[in-house]
Image (cartoon, rainbow, N blue to C red):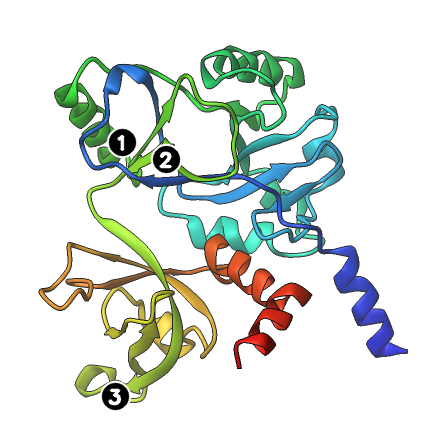
């Protein structure tokens, strides 16, 4: 009976992952006049289905009823955010069932798109503002979208965001429809690159780190393996991400052998593998994929 109850509870807190837009990295070759620019907030992506909030991975977010009261019956795409440098805090709040109301009162929902709006992003920008104004709740905010004239103005905007404690900028092509997946319609600009990898092992620390985790052995989705040994707090070294977990790391370019240079731990991915890996896993588990594998044995 207990196992059945756990299964029913898990099903009640899971939904199909939403089909969302994903950002590629900005490489400097873009015609900036075609894009809107906004700050990239380091929070938990929250997708409002029209009935409930879910994460990008499909987990149901147990926000208090007052938090989403009066929201529209059409989808919203945004970021649940608390403050600069507080990703771990907001992630803990968002992923706690029946979280304390006082904790949620420090969380804002920053709306950056309307997934089912039929127009281009040029048309969606004023529609986002109108939608948020109609909700009329101080914790629901339309992320500011603005234009830049040239690369120098873009650099100035990036530097201002970083000075506030932000992590970068997002560029969104004005002519783009809302289409799931990665494309040049949505670009991220950061002072460093970041990527995901799966934990496959760990190494003990030495010296000051004796008794703690020294580094994690990880494997990227394309099979490259390396160690990540910096960027961890002592608390994270005491309870490091377990084998099988996915992490996000930051780095500065690649070595001659194709490995990330100066890889540093950024955070554990709360939703598991990146969307592309999860999609591949789903395809691999499909009956057609199994039959194909049988035919090629």
Q: Residues within 10 Å of mark 2 (few under 14, many from 20)?
A: some
Marked residue nearer the N-terminal end (3 or 2): 2
Q: Helix, strand or loop at disc 2? A: loop
Q: Nearer the viewer, residue 132 or 176?
A: 176
Distance, label 3 to label 2, CA atoms, is 37 Å
Direction from residue 283 to residue 156 in the image, left or right = left
Residue 59's tag is none
**Quarter assignment of residue 133:** top right
Distance, label 3 to label 1, CA atoms, is 38 Å
Q: Which residue is mark 3?
A: 210
* Residue 146 location (% of width, % of height): 34, 16
Marked residue nearer the N-terminal end (3 or 1): 1
Direction from residue 62 to residue 295 in the image, left or right = left
Is the C-beta separation of discs 3 and 2 under 8 Å? Answer: no
* Residue 207 location (% of width, % of height): 17, 87
Is the C-beta separation of discs 1 and 2 under 8 Å? Answer: yes
Distance, label 1 to label 2, CA atoms, is 9 Å
Q: Which residue is mark 1?
A: 161
Which residue is the extreme one toward the left? 256
Q: Helix, strand or loop at disc 3? A: loop
Residue 40's tag is 2
Which residue is depicted at the point 82% across and 77% down?
A: 3
Q: Is residue 200 above or below residue 278?
A: below
* Residue 57 location (% of width, % of height): 58, 53
Which residue is the extreme one toward the front? 295
Q: Nearer the viewer, residue 72 or 283?
A: 283
Mark 3 or mark 2, whichever is nearer to me: 2
Which residue is depicted at the point 25% across and 75% down?
A: 227
Q: Is residue 292 above or below residue 168?
A: below
Q: Helix, strand or loop at disc 1? A: helix
Direction from residue 222 to residue 92 in the image, left or right = right
């Amino acid at each position: 009976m207990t196992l059945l109850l756990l299964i029913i509870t898990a099903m009640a807190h899971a939904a199909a992952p939403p089909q969302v837009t994903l950002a590629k990295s900005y490489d400097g070759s873009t015609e900036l006049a075609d894009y809107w620019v906004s700050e990239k907030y380091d929070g938990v992506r929250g997708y409002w289905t029209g009935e409930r909030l879910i994460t990008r991975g499909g987990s149901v977010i147990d926000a208090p009823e007052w938090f989403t009261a009066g929201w529209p019956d059409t989808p919203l795409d945004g970021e649940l955010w608390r403050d600069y440098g507080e990703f771990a805090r907001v992630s803990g709040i968002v992923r706690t069932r029946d979280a304390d109301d006082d904790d949620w009162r420090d969380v804002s929902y920053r709306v950056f798109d309307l997934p089912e709006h039929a127009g281009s992003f040029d048309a969606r920008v004023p529609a986002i503002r109108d939608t948020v104004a109609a909700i009329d709740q101080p914790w629901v905010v339309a992320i500011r979208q603005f234009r830049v004239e040239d690369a120098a103005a873009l650099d100035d905007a990036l530097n201002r965001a970083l000075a506030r404690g932000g992590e970068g900028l997002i560029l969104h092509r004005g002519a783009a429809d809302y289409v799931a997946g990665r494309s040049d319609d949505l670009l991220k600009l950061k002072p460093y690159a970041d990527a995901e990898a799966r934990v496959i092992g760990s190494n003990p620390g030495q010296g000051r780190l004796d008794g703690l985790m020294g580094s994690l052995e990880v494997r990227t989705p394309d099979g490259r393996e390396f160690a990540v040994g910096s960027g961890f707090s002592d608390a994270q070294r005491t309870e490091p991400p377990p084998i099988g977990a996915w992490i996000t790391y930051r780095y500065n370019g690649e070595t001659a052998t194709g490995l990330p240079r100066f890889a540093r731990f950024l955070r554990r991915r709360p939703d598991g593998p990146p969307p592309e890996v999860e999609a591949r896993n789903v395809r691999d588990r499909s009956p057609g994929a199994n039959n194909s594998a049988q035919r090629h044995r």
